Image (cartoon, rainbow, N blue to C red):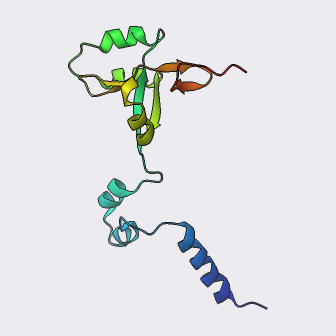
Amino acid sequence: MFEHNFFTEYYRKVFNLFIPEDKHQIVNNRKELNFITVANTYRLIDDNTKPLFILNDESRPLYESIRYKPVLSRADFRAMQQYSVQVYDNFFKKNIDKIGQEPQGYWIWYGDYNEEFGISTDNTLLIV
């Protein structure tokens, strides 16, 4: 029969293999009751994405309504969400020639977009 310590040690080693170390010291900050620090540093998934506003016939009326506003409101950004997609930094850098930034700070995708397949980085769509 196995001792309980064996399983504890085994799972500790497996956990350390697959779970990254606590680089933000979240465990220590929780123990010291530094909850503001924990809240500011804890991220379940690192967000390495940027939103792109897809400019097409459907989104153009919204774009025209916000285009010349000096500052966008929360309602403007909320309305933009339905026409936006999140892209990773490497996609962003690779396709910078199809992306523009507006004075208010948001990014626009000028390339192709297909409702079924999403962003297309070339001008040909796959027909199945």
Q: Position of residue 112 (x, y in %)?
A: 50, 19
Residue found farthest to the right:
1
* Position of residue 72 measured from the top left corner of the image (x, y, whole percent): 27, 22
Residue 100 at what x, y percent from top left?
33, 24
In this rendering, would 75 be left or right of 115? left
Lateral position of residue 10 relative to residue 57, left or right: right
- Residues 17 and 113: in front is 113
Residue at 42%, 68% in the rendered image: 22
Could you tell me residue 108's position as x and y percent? Answer: 37, 23
74 vs 56, nearest the viewer: 56
Most distant residue in the left direction: 70
Q: Which picture quadrant has residue 71?
A: top left
Who's the residue at 79% across and 91% down the image? Answer: 1
Depth order, front residue of 86/109? 109
Image quarter hosting the C terminus: top right
**Residue at image coords 37%, 26%:** 97
Q: Is residue 117 above or below residue 47?
A: above
Instruction: Name which quarter of the figure residue 75 lies in.
Output: top left
Tell how many labels.
Answer: 0
